[in-house]
């Protein structure tokens, strides 16, 4: 089965409709990720089918839960995951990737240029050092840190009413119990990722009035 067939089948299984131009860019991104990975070690996953399932489809699984977002920050995204696939899938969504490792931020900038993504920007910095006049209405992380650290390091970038979205594997009971005061879980969404035989959850966190 070709990469295009794997991608198209996965999108159909998740009920996500994307135009051919977006699918072309997703495949081009996967090719770019593999190319740079040979030198910069952006990800430990190198198999083409696994890149489709464990990276692209895994990233896109959260798309239905971003319908209200206009400004999204992606924290510690490494090779641009999930930020770049989400920027490709939603051209109207302004995505800012905050990545402290220079070689990874450089790859993201190159991907922005080659894939022509005007709605995507890469910031090479530690998230706790980033300041913005206008906050983000959604901040997402994928295997970035435990929930308490994610909240502590990035909550200052939230706009009023904004939400933190943490992509996790198994349900993180202990991490949820360690959330800092002023924040609580608004929703936990089980995610079904085609081709991925593992538990995935989206933990949606918001201020509870004391933060």
Image: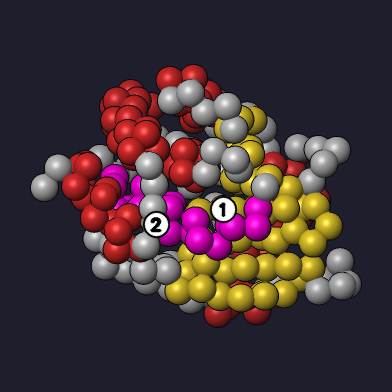
Q: Secondary structure at mark 2?
A: loop
* Residue assigned mark 1: 141
- Residue at the (39%, 53%) spot, across then down: 17
Quarter of the C terminus within the rendering: bottom right
Mark 1 packing: few (<14 Cα in 10 Å), some, or many (20+)? Answer: many
Q: From the top left corner, tell me how far across and down residue 43 is, in percent.
A: 36, 40
Q: From the top left corner, tell me how far across and down residue 74 is, in percent.
A: 59, 45
Asked whether, in this view, residue 42 is left or right of residue 108, the answer is left
- Residue at the (72%, 74%) spot, across then down: 184
On screen, 101 above or below 44? Answer: above
In depth, the one of 40 and 92 nearer the eye is: 92
The question of residue 63 being in magenta is answered with yes
Asked whether, in this view, residue 60 is left or right of residue 74, the answer is left
Magenta segment, which residues? Answer: 50-69
In depth, the one of 26 and 197 nearer the eye is: 26
Q: Main secondary structure of the magenta part?
A: helix
Q: CA distance from mark 2 to mark 1?
A: 21 Å
Quarter of image, res 146? bottom right
Choose mark 2 or mark 1, whichever is in front: 2
Q: Which mark is residue 16?
A: 2
Is any part of residue 150 visible from this angle?
no
- Residue at the (38%, 42%) spot, across then down: 19
Of the image marks 2 and 1, the number of the one nearer the N terminus:
2
On screen, 51 above or below 208? Answer: above
Q: Number of callouts in the render?
A: 2
Q: Secondary structure at mark 1?
A: strand
Is any part of residue 162 visible from this angle?
yes
Which residue sits furthest left?
Answer: 1
Q: From the top left corner, tell me how far across and down residue 203 is, in percent.
A: 57, 69
- Residue at the (49%, 20%) spot, across then down: 113
């Amino acid at each position: 089965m070709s990469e295009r067939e794997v991608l198209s089948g996965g999108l159909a299984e998740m009920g996500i409709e994307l135009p051919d131009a977006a699918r072309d860019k997703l495949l081009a991104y996967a090719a770019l990720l593999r190319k740079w990975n040979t030198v910069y070690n952006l990800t430990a996953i190198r198999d083409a089918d696994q890149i489709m399932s464990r990276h692209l489809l895994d990233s896109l699984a959260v798309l239905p839960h971003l319908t209200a977002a206009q400004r999204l920050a992606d924290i510690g995204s490494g090779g641009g995951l999930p930020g770049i696939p989400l920027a490709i899938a939603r051209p109207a969504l302004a995505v800012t990737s905050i990545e402290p490792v220079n070689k990874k931020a450089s790859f993201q900038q190159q991907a922005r240029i080659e894939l022509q993504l005007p709605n995507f920007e890469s910031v090479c910095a530690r998230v706790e050092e980033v300041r913005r006049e206008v906050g983000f209405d959604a901040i997402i992380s994928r295997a970035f840190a435990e929930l308490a650290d994610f909240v502590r390091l990035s909550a200052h970038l939230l706009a009023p009413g904004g939400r933190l979205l943490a992509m996790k594997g198994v349900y993180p009971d202990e991490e949820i119990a360690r959330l800092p005061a002023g924040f609580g879980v608004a929703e936990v969404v089980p995610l079904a990722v085609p081709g991925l035989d593992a538990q995935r959850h989206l933990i949606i966190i918001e201020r509870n009035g004391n933060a």
